Amino acid sequence: MRHVISLLIENESGALSRVSGLFSARGYNIESLTVAPTEDASMSRMTIVTTGSDDIIEQITKQLNKLVEVVKVVDISEAAHIERELMLVKVRATGKDREEIKRTADIFRARIIDVTDASYVVELTGNQGKLDAFLGAIEPALILETVRSGVCGVGRGDRVLKL
Amino acid sequence: MVLTGAEIVIRCLQEEKVEYVFGYPGGAVLYIYDALFQQEAVRHVLVRHEQAAVHAADGYARSTERVGVALVTSGPGATNAVTGIATAFCDSIPLVVISGQVPTAAIGQDAFQEVDTVGITRPCVKHNFLVKDVRDIASTIKKAFYLAKTGRPGPVLVDIPKDVSMHKCEFEYPKEISMRSYNPVVKGHSGQIKKAVQLLLEAKRPMIYTGGGVVLSNAAEQLTRLTRLLGYPITNTLMGLGGYPASDRQYLGMPGMHGTYEANMSMHYSDVLLAVGARFDDRVIGLPSHFAEEPRKIIHIDIDPSSISKRVKVDVPIVGDVKEVLEEMIRQLESGEARPNPEALAAWWKQVEEWRGRNCMVYKNSDEIIKPQFVVQKLWEVTGGEAIVTSDVGQHQMWAAQYYRFDKPRRWLNSGGLGTMGVGMPYAMGAKLANPDMPVACITGEASIQMNIQELSTCKQFRLPIKICNLNNRYLGMVRQWQQLFHGQRYSESYMDSLPDFAKLAESYGHVGIRVDKPGDVEGAIREAFTTHKNELVFLDFQVDQTENVYPMVQGGKGLTEMILSAEDL
């Protein structure tokens, strides 16, 4: 099962490697991992997408909690939540492809944020499925680069991960 | 008061009432050694190898309730310390290891004796710190001691660059420390404890299984009271020996790979299993799927939530300090009316006694050749079971655990989790310094002892009269045993040729060496070591049976009840 784990961690050097080291040392999967400081600069928020059986997910959250620098851990995928990922795609945009890519971008509510006479950079935000679908809708040979941020997520409504 | 970083380090150790620091100087810690030189409260024990420094600090911690402290230099000093740190980590031993680092400006420049110590040790410490500012030294060391000894204990490393130890700042040692990200649970959930007590009282085939957590939590007294109150059979793991008196009738011996028949059978066929500060290790329960075949309810008390339901599914988890939880269980039991069902318990004990009647620990003694088990038994007799016993790793470790009966906690020091050969003598050094009035014996083998044999020199310098009992079988015995049983008797690299004359070697360091060849001389030699040479280090080199194996045995990957009881079962 796929899970989205969110955590608050002290914003200190080495904190990220404690988390990533834990996953590699214990053989857990990391599908994606994003991290950035929160409104309180002394703390970072991390979103980890991982897969595993219920037992493994239970161990992952317990092991994460055990790290001294980890302040709080929540499996946000246990209940209603929102996930978003940002993607930047650089595509070759010449001739008739130029118009076609523009149209596809509009359908996906993507934005073209860089234009040259031979390329576009398309910015798209959404859940993983939407980004995958956009990539599927574009002729693979036209894709020059794909950059994805990894998933970040938040619980819906009253569910708040805060100190 | 304005002090240098180095002076602050030593002042912090004084504030923490540190008696001994085990260490080895080098370039990056010269300022710290200079500060150490100019005071007397904290004494330094100069080892001969950094690995032994950490092991000795570890042995000091295991034999007391205190945090062990080691001090090493950067680069190779730190890497040599890693085995010691990992050993302590696997057994949850509270240590503070201070390592020197190259100056801040040189970090990342591939400087002389530079390694990423924080990076290298990260997976084998409870936590570690790189101190980049002299103003952070005091609070970091305070945190290090706090982290090491609270919650599930463990080693904490503090890496201090040379320039930071030279810089000056105002010194003030924080009185209190609180960390928003670290709040270990101490008290168990009272509802869960109630459930556990009820389950225990309803049990028909109850069993108590306890581990190192009982020793670490100083809960032997509470465990003994609870066990006697219930009247249930109990087993202590390798790490938990001494948690309950081994000479008591309710004690069934150690469980696991080399555990007793009665302990393993009772674990397996129990209907309610109370696990206390133990972690269902692969050496204890054998194959988890086989263990799960018998239906039983499991109550698990542990301070570390991640130890619960890790290898076996637990029915009543209780997160908390073992001592606190046991006290609450006793309180609930004593204040309630309910008592265990006497008929069911009598029937269960009858079964347990039948298993015990198999006498699985009997071995064939000999008048011609010294049996290693016999040496351990004699050591137990001569010391009246009152010695602190350390061991290395291998066959001798199992014989020590099986035949030296520990009635009290913190008397048995061994590397249970990591299984580090070479810990025995440094553990004995740390234990002897911490307990100068107690006899300390190190049961070892000719292979393990050579892994830190250089410490004979440290023992001479610091006059540590430990008694080394070398069960010398001229083989890497446990490896040889596995090769005999599972690898077609192809003894690949398990024979050790060119051994030193250990007695003479000990003498060359200024110690007493005694070689013992005959069973009839064993007791006399041990007595001589503990009486005539009470104040000297004695190296007893017992020439033991080369082919003796450790039984009972559960093979790796087998179920707990699938035991080989003796050579006849092969």
Image (tube, coloured by chain):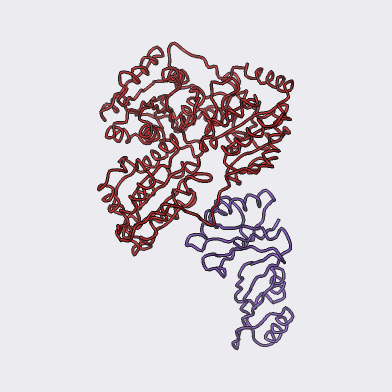
Chain colours: A purple, B red
Residue B565 placed where, x, y %? 59, 21
B104 lies left or right of A145: left
B150 lies left or right of B337: left
Residue B429 placed where, x, y %? 36, 34
B527 lies left or right of B88: left
Of residues B449 and B430, the one drawn nearer to the viewer in this rendering: B430
Of residues B41 and B151, the one drawn nearer to the viewer in this rendering: B41
Q: Quadrant of residue B449?
A: top left
Residue B88 placed where, x, y %? 46, 42
B32 vs B205: above or below:
below
Q: Quadrant of residue B472?
A: top left
Q: Quadrant of residue B173?
A: bottom left
B62 vs B475: above or below:
below
Which residue is rendered at x = 60% and y = 35% of the image?
Answer: B326
Which residue is rendered at x = 37% and y = 61% of the image?
Answer: B135
Of residues B567 and B389, the one drawn nearer to the viewer in this rendering: B389
Which residue is rendered at x = 58% and y = 51% of the image?
Answer: A63
B259 lies left or right of B422: right
